[in-house]
């Protein structure tokens, strides 16, 4: 008995769709099978091409069964009437259920279809429950949204379509294009690294939540830190300059906070922001 077999794309299989569709052509005659295969394969391809973000796996399987059964009923009559073919290959959404076996299998394999915007909202809520500082959560949200906002530019997508882009639709190519776009926006090496780290953390969380099958930012890095040119390096203070600062009238007239911060920077090798944080803790 001859069969038509079509394998689905990996991106669809990762979302829970079946590995392949195998349809009996109800004949052992090769010449007849070739003719029937043209209709069956063409119909299946059109249905598969109409799968979108809103397509339910169960609806897809059910619709394929209905269309194939209609075609095969014509095989038994030894003809393929054009009127029996569906006018549209868009998969209808229905409330009825498959048999218990097919239903349980599809649900077990299914990956939830979650848009980037919904996933980001869930991600922020999860971080809030983890006790992370509000400022850190805000930075994660802003930097992740920066990636989502740039998708029309890096992915050749329309701004409206980004609302429906799912977490599992993002590829490593999108991640690399985003990295390249970051490098052209004039930020520092450290800032670009933090932007990539935020988006990496977001997709790592999505993978743990089964919102996507892989982390597209897994191996994406900013690259090596650029070396500072000699004429761009900061001048170091020598001992005489430090003594002149400490013994100056301006320093003696400054506030106690300023004096403590300066000494902490000098003896602890701290940055101004680090020294100020210590000062706030002590007070």
Image (cartoon, rainbow, N blue to C red):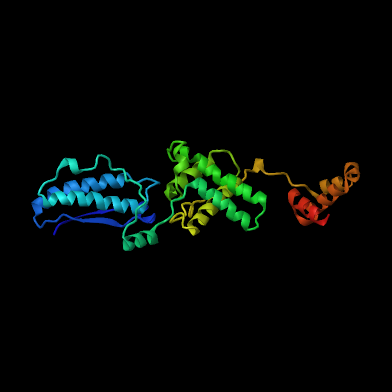
- Rendered view: 20 above or below 163: below
Residue 116 relative to residue 88: left or right:
right
Residue 245 pos. (x, y %) = 85, 45
Q: Locate the C terminus and report the quarter of the image it occupies.
A: bottom right
Residue 177 pos. (x, y %) = 46, 43
260 vs 225, nearest the viewer:
260
> Which residue sits at x=43%, y=47%?
173
Q: How many marks?
A: 0
> Which residue sits at x=39%, y=62%?
108
Residue 244 pos. (x, y %) = 86, 45
> Which residue sits at x=25%, y=53%?
65
Residue 122 relative to residue 111: left or right:
right
- Rendered view: 4 above or below 92: below
Q: Is residue 141 visible?
A: yes
264 vs 168, nearest the viewer:
168
Q: Residue farthest to the front?
A: 96
Residue 145 relative to residue 283: left or right:
left
Q: Locate the N terminus and report the quarter of the image it occupies.
A: bottom left
Q: Is residue 8 visible?
A: no
């Amino acid at each position: 008995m001859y069969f038509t077999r079509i394998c689905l794309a990996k991106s669809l299989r990762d979302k829970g769709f079946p590995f392949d569709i195998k349809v009996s052509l109800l004949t052992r005659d090769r010449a007849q099978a070739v003719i029937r295969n043209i209709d069956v394969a063409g119909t299946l391809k059109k249905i598969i091409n109409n799968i979108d973000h809103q397509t339910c796996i169960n609806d897809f399987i059910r619709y394929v069964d209905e269309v194939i059964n209609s075609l095969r009923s014509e095989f038994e009559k030894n003809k393929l009437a054009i009127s029996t073919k569906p006018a549209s290959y868009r998969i209808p959404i229905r409330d009825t259920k498959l048999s218990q076996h097919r239903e349980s299998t599809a649900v077990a394999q299914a990956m939830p279809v979650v848009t980037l915007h919904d996933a980001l909202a869930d991600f922020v809520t999860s971080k809030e429950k983890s006790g992370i500082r509000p400022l850190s959560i805000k930075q994660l949200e802003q930097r992740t949204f920066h990636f989502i906002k740039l998708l029309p530019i890096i992915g050749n997508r329309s701004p409206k379509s980004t609302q429906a882009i799912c977490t599992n639709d993002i590829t490593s190519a999108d991640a690399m294009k985003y990295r390249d776009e970051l490098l052209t926006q004039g930020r520092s090496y450290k800032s670009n690294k933090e932007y990539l780290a935020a988006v990496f953390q977001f997709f790592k969380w999505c993978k743990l939540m089964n919102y996507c099958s892989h982390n597209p930012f897994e191996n994406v890095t900013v690259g090596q830190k650029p070396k500072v040119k000699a004429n761009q390096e900061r001048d170091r203070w020598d001992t005489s300059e430090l003594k002149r600062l400490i013994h100056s009238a301006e320093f003696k007239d400054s506030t106690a906070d300023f004096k403590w911060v300066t000494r902490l920077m000098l003896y602890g090798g701290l940055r101004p922001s680090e020294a100020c944080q210590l000062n706030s803790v002590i007070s």
